[in-house]
Amino acid sequence: MKRFVTLLAATALISGFASAQEATLPTPDAKAIGMGGVMMTTLSSSHAIYNNAAIALFSMTPSQVSSSYYGQGSFDYYAVSGSCRIGHANLVQAGWRQYLRERGNNDMAVDMGYSRRINERWAIGVVARYLHLRRPDVSADALAADLSVAYQLPLENIGSYSSLRAGAKLANLGSYLNRTDYILPMDLTAGVALDTFLTDAHEITVGTDLGYYFYPKGVRGFQLSLGMEYNLMQLVQFRAGYHYGEQRYYYPSYWSIGTGVRILHLRLDFAYLFAGKETLLHNTYSLSFGFDF
């Protein structure tokens, strides 16, 4: 039985024991993390390429660059990404991530994404990924892809300027290029969110994601994210959420809080997780900074 570290795309990074070893990198986006890991429908986030590449086409932001630090006492995780809109219907994205852990662990990933708006309500996206895994006893490379879809519907009879969003992603389809005990965990996640303005200055967003990790067999299980955001005058945001993980050793349950500031074209987001002391999510936080243009 070998010790392994599983980095799951639902904002979890946990260690445990299994007969196989898995590795991938979670989203570092502080906005999504602050809402309990709600990723499928999160607009104006720092790293849509790591959440749902298709949903970014419904954002009012034409282009952006972002960076994040996601960490805890025993690891450091850095990410940089950017997106550029081409006309009304196309969006290209790119990102780089690096995960550093004690005892020589060093994971790196490069992502390239393309999203297209099919019509006023539907968009699709694809992300290709190169992952380099380095451990004291092994070095390996992998190729993978994410497929995503997003939907947005304006609601005229509920609140003011309300909209309903839905999204889904099939993530981490791929494998390692060389022989290794490590395996890429695959998952399917879907979510829905509702935006509404209470007044011109007060906006509320509530959302939920439901995901299932179906490969490999040893980490199969459901995850559920519930989150909300209060947006004051499009300047200051306050967030909270809860994340339930069916297998607490691989992806545990936690509470989260977060806040954000928007000043002209600048974005600053912070999130903090409240998780059990026995997991690597204990005292985990994320800080994201970005520029919209």
Image: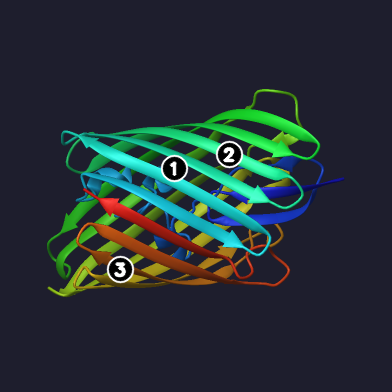
Q: Residue at position x 17%, y 42% from top? A: 120
Q: Residue at position x 18%, y 71% from top? A: 197
Vertical relation: 292 (above or below) 85: below
Q: Locate residue 171, reporting x and y percent.
A: 51, 39
Q: What element carries label 3?
A: strand
Q: Which amino acid does label 1 sit on?
A: Lys
Q: Residue at position x 44%, y 55% from top? A: 29
Q: How is the image coloured?
A: rainbow
Q: What element carries label 1?
A: strand
Q: Locate residue 191, reporting x and y percent.
A: 40, 54
Do residues under tags 3 and 2 come within 8 Å of each other at their CB atoms? no
For disc 1, the marked residue is 169
Q: How crowded is mark 2: few (under 14 residues within 10 Å), some or many (20 or more)?
A: many
Q: Nearer the viewer, residue 172 or 110?
A: 110
Instruction: Report, in whole angstroms, how far the alpha carbon at label 2 lies from the one at label 1.
Output: 22 Å
Q: Can residue 42 be seen in this view?
A: no
Q: Locate residue 15, reporting x and y percent.
A: 72, 55
Q: Can residue 165 be seen in this view?
A: yes
Q: Which amino acid does label 2 sit on?
A: Met
Do residues under tags 2 and 1 come within 8 Å of each other at their CB atoms? no
For disc 2, the marked residue is 108
In the picture, which quadrant includes the N terminus? top right
Q: Nearer the viewer, residue 68 or 178?
A: 68
Q: Residue furthest top?
A: 178
Task: Tell whether 122 sits left or right of 217.
Answer: left
For disc 3, the marked residue is 261
Q: Which mark is residue 22?
A: none
Q: How crowded is mark 3: few (under 14 residues within 10 Å), some or many (20 or more)?
A: some
Q: Residue at position x 45%, y 62% from top? A: 287
Task: Tell whether 144 sits left or right of 289.
Answer: right
Q: What residue type is labelled 3?
A: Val
